């Protein structure tokens, strides 16, 4: 800034403020129960330690069956020399509060910033529809989170899941800025079980998404994922059966007590517990994939054909025919994006459709998210012209600002064409987008057209065999 020493009139030239770039489109709002923290207050975190500091960790598991059998003993030390250890987790008794594990999966797959909306403290009964649905309302107060992820919806009944899904999609549409990542769900034929009746599960899930007007504001994924994460365990509440000649057998022995009674056996049990890994719905991992693809390439790139980290694989190996039926449904759309394992390539996200799978405009996740990103950026760029004179000079500045923004997106590869005007147009002015009445009533109307790139979902290779001549 020039410092003037004497009074007078001075003229300085300044450029218009820079056009704001596209905002971060991969900031999710995670809804679920937490160990501590203020309920229904959207809180920003930047890492897993940040979450732990504010909200705590996982609800410790207690539904473990631990058996230690000494096959021989060392009488001098009164310790088991050879141990047979068995640890089983009762899936029906598992905690349904999985938000902490979901956050681990999110950060393992490239997640950065996120918002947490706590539904309250841990319960003994599991997630409730009323608690989770009440957490949608506070999202209207914060502009940054644009993805909505509710992993604990997987514990709801079909009826409650339907209610929550419809409410989530409606909320995303009302915010005009949100996109829901949904775990395909059916309690009768769970996508969390390797014995799922896939066709029945898909049909039931599609019935649960009954709305039609907001389907383009969300995408569904299946199946659940076998992770490499570890369980939190309440060692004071896990009973241990410890038998064998010469081995310690105090009544009411717990895992915490075993640590003091026989450290070697305790470490053997802990090693066995470390071999147990939670099976989780995929939404949190997908949110991390969105963040990773956005950072490496851009929001306009389909978040598909990319690996999922911290997993050993999907718990259901869909056949090609099953994957086809999940990806497309000629009657309802309501595509379910599959996660599949490929030899030599690992576990990949193998779909990029929104729930509006038959929609010509918003069929693809990246197209919907890119349009939302452009709308948000254009809104920010135009805000500084509010109360400016509604005349030709202002219109020219608005057009230049928006064209600058879209040219950057075209150069990045988000828009079609070999020239910018083949990828977009911006129109504003009297006689084109506004009438005299619009100007008199203070309305400045801008029209933006976009030719968004779409993914090559079906790559068709045609081979022709020709006979040698001569």
Image (cartoon, rainbow, N blue to C red):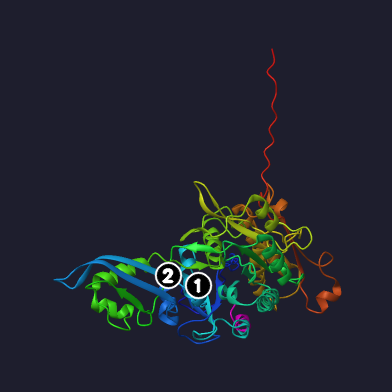
Crowding at dot 1, Cα within 10 Å, few <14 / some 14-19 / many 20+, comes out as: few
Assess whether residue 258 is covered by the magenta stretch: no
Which residue has dot 1 on it?
91
Q: Is residue 49 left or right of residue 364?
A: left
Depth order, front residue of 304/278: 278
The residue under the point 44% across, 66% down is: 277
Q: Locate residue 68, reporting x and y percent.
A: 32, 71
Residue 88's disc number? 2
Write down the region rendered in magenta: 135-143
Would residue 91 appear left or right of 469 to someone viewing this image?
left
| Residue with the most extreme front position | 245
What secondary structure is marked by label 2? Answer: strand
Instruction: Tell me: residue 125, above or below residue 18.
Output: below
The percent coordinates of residue 347 (x first, y second) are 52, 54
- Depth order, front residue of 232/298: 232
Question: How far, Cα to Cα, is label 2 from label 1?
Answer: 9 Å
Q: How many marks?
A: 2
């Amino acid at each position: 800034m020039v410092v003037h020493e004497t009074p007078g009139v001075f003229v300085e030239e300044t450029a218009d403020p820079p056009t704001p770039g596209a905002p971060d489109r991969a900031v999710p709002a995670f809804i679920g129960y937490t160990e501590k923290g203020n309920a229904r207050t959207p809180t920003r975190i930047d890492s897993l330690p940040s979450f732990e500091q504010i909200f705590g960790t996982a609800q410790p598991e207690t539904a473990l069956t631990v058996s230690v059998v000494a096959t021989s003993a060392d009488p001098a030390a009164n310790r088991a020399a050879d141990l047979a250890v068995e640890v089983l987790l009762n899936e029906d008794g598992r905690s349904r509060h999985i938000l902490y594990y979901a956050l681990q999966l999110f950060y393992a797959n490239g997640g950065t910033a996120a918002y947490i909306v706590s539904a309250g403290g841990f319960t003994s009964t599991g997630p409730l529809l009323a608690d989770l649905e009440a957490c949608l309302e506070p999202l209207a107060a914060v502009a940054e989170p644009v993805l909505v992820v509710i992993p604990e919806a997987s514990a709801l009944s079909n009826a409650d899941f339907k209610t929550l899904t419809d409410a989530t999609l409606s909320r995303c549409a009302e915010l005009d800025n949100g996109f829901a990542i949904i775990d395909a769900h059916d309690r009768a034929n769970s996508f969390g079980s390797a014995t799922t009746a896939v066709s029945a599960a898909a049909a039931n899930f599609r019935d649960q998404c009954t709305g039609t007007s907001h389907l383009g504001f969300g995408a569904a994924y299946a199946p659940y994922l076998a992770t490499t994460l570890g369980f939190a365990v309440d060692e004071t509440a896990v009973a241990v059966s410890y038998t064998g000649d010469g081995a310690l057998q105090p009544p009411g022995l717990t895992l915490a007590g075993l640590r003091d009674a026989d450290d070697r056996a305790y470490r053997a049990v802990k090693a066995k517990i470390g071999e147990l890994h939670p099976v989780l719905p995929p939404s949190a991992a997908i949110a991390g994939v969105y963040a990773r693809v956005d950072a490496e390439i851009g929001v306009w790139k389909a978040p598909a054909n990319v690996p999922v980290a911290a997993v050993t694989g999907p718990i259901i190996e869909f056949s090609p025919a099953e994957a086809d039926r999940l990806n497309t449904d000629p009657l309802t759309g309501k595509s379910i994006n599959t996660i599949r394992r490929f030899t030599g390539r690992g576990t990949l996200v193998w779909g990029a459709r929104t729930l509006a799978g038959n929609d010509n405009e918003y069929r693809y996740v990246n197209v919907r998210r890119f349009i939302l990103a452009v709308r948000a950026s254009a809104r920010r760029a135009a805000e500084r012209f509010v109360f400016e004179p509604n005349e030709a000079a202002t219109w020219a500045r608005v057009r230049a600002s928006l064209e600058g923004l879209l040219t950057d997106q075209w150069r990045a590869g988000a828009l079609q064409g070999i020239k910018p005007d083949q990828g977009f147009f911006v129109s504003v002015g009297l006689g084109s987008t506004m009438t005299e009445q619009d100007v008199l009533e203070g309305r400045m109307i801008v029209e933006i057209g976009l030719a968004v790139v779409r993914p090559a979902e079906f790559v068709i290779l045609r081979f022709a065999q020709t006979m040698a001549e001569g």
